[in-house]
Image: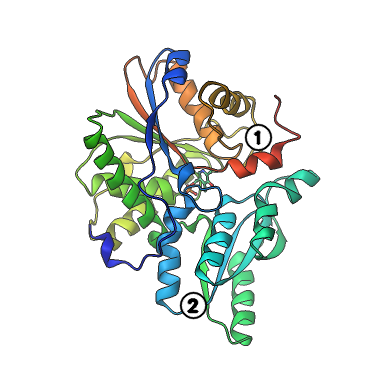
């Protein structure tokens, strides 16, 4: 694996810290929980998309693009980080926002990430759920070309093989930190959505010879769909970095039992997890991704599936800007 072969824009503060959570671990009375602080990647309140965007934006610049086009939900953390990255690199940012959550409040449609998108001056266009975004993207790309610009498309979550390189890098970074801190970790837990984070991590670890298991906690799709999505992207990413076939299908595990009523819909367990981490460790998680993934990890510890003495790393993928959009739905 040779990541230095790929164009890369410098956007993230790396390496992010790896920290022990003593009060949470004691409270749950089972596993020892560590947190990988990818909420601290440094760009516009941080998050996992910044690592991916180093490679996506790097590729855009290498192709001579001056405009990026991307897509996400109204409260997309990916869109917020892309809008900020475009500002930092002097590019224009065209955004397609999908209304994915039913009956959104005015706070949901105006605060949190979408408020920050507006601060970054991104050109926002809103679409109903289920829109054909390939078609919409082609229309915007044609507009950009008509005005003499050069567009570059970044898919939702920057989850293609190029974006997933950011998490190949994170996998390598984690292995270095385990070595430096003399940690013998048993399991990594992460939220998994558009799949690039999970897929990239799997390639980063397996491509480095590590067989450390990864548990993805799904936030939108059913298990078979999510695992297949991660696996296909992992295969593509592995081929891109020159570690073909390093990940096997049964190595990709996603538990999709913590989604609740749907993507972006609050659950009691997410609510409890967000408050627990805030009040025990002073850490902010998000309602859509990391909060539901935490709810999954907490349930695994409580039910003994992660037993006493197990050493876990929870990948904190960020998203706290999205909390403000849930100010009227979280129960405090
Ligand atoms: C996008 C996102 C994820 C999921 O990462 P994918 O690469 O899309 O699977 C998890 N947590 C947060 C906060 C995110 O914004």
Q: Is residue 5 left or right of residue 102?
A: left
Q: Is residue 24 visible?
A: yes
Horizontal and vertical percent for residue 40? Answer: 47, 44
Apparent side of residue 241 relative to residue 66 in the rendered image (left or right):
left
Can you tell which of label 2 and label 1 is closer to the viewer?
Answer: 2
Say above or below: 233 vs 288: below
Q: Residues within 10 Å of mark 1 (few under 14, many from 20)?
A: few
Res. 98 image quadrant: bottom right
Disc 2, SS: loop
- Location of residue 237 with respect to 151 vertically, above or below: above
Ligand 1 within 8 Å of the CB at mark 2: no
Residue hosting label 2: 65
Task: Write down the residue under mark 1.
Answer: 261
The C terminus sits in image quarter = top right
Q: Sequence order check: which comes first, mark 2 or mark 1?
A: 2
Q: Nearer the viewer, residue 137 or 118?
A: 118
Front residue of this view, candidates 95 and 305 = 95
Q: Point out residue 254 in the picture as x, y percentages from the top left corner.
A: 43, 37
Q: CA distance from mark 2 to mark 1?
A: 40 Å
Crowd tier of the residue under label 2, counting other residues whose Cα lies within 10 Å: few below 14, some 14–19, many 20 or above: some
Residue at image coords 53%, 81% = 150
Q: Position of residue 91 (x, y in %)?
A: 55, 72
Q: Residue at x 53, y 21 (%)?
A: 280
Q: Which residue is nearer to you in this view: 210 or 258?
A: 210
């Amino acid at each position: 694996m040779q990541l230095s072969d790929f164009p890369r824009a410098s956007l993230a503060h790396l390496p992010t810290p790896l920290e022990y959570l003593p009060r949470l671990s004691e409270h749950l009375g089972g596993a020892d929980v560590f947190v990988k602080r990818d909420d601290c990647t440094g760009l516009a309140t941080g998050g996992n998309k910044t690592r991916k965007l180093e490679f996506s934006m790097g590729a855009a610049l290498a192709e001579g693009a001056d405009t990026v086009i991307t897509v996400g939900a109204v409260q997309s953390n990916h869109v917020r980080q892309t809008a900020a990255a475009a500002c930092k690199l002097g590019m224009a940012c065209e955004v397609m926002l999908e209304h994915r959550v039913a009956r959104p409040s005015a706070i949901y449609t105006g605060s949190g990430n979408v408020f920050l998108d507006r601060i970054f001056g991104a050109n926002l266009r809103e679409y109903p759920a289920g829109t054909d975004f390939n078609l919409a993207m082609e229309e915007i790309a044609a507009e950009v070309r008509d005005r003499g610009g050069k567009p570059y498309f970044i898919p939702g979550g920057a989850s293609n093989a190029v974006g997933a390189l950011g998490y190949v890098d994170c996998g390598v970074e984690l292995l270095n930190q385990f070595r430096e801190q003399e940690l013998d970790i048993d399991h990594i837990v992460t939220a998994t959505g558009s799949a690039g984070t999970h897929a990239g991590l799997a390639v980063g670890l397996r491509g480095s010879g590590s067989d450390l298991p990864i548990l993805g906690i799904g936030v939108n799709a059913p298990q078979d769909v999510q695992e297949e999505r991660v696996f296909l992207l992992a295969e593509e990413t592995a081929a891109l970095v020159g570690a073909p076939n390093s990940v096997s299908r049964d190595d990709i595990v996603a538990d999709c039992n913590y989604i609740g009523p749907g993507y972006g819909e609050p659950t009691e367990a997410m609510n409890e997890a967000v408050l627990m981490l805030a009040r025990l460790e002073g850490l902010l998680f998000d309602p859509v991704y990391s909060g539901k993934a935490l709810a999954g990890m907490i349930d695994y510890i409580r039910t003994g599936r992660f037993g006493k003495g197990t050493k876990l790393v929870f990948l904190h993928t960020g998203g706290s800007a999205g909390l403000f959009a849930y100010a009227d739905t979280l129960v405090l």
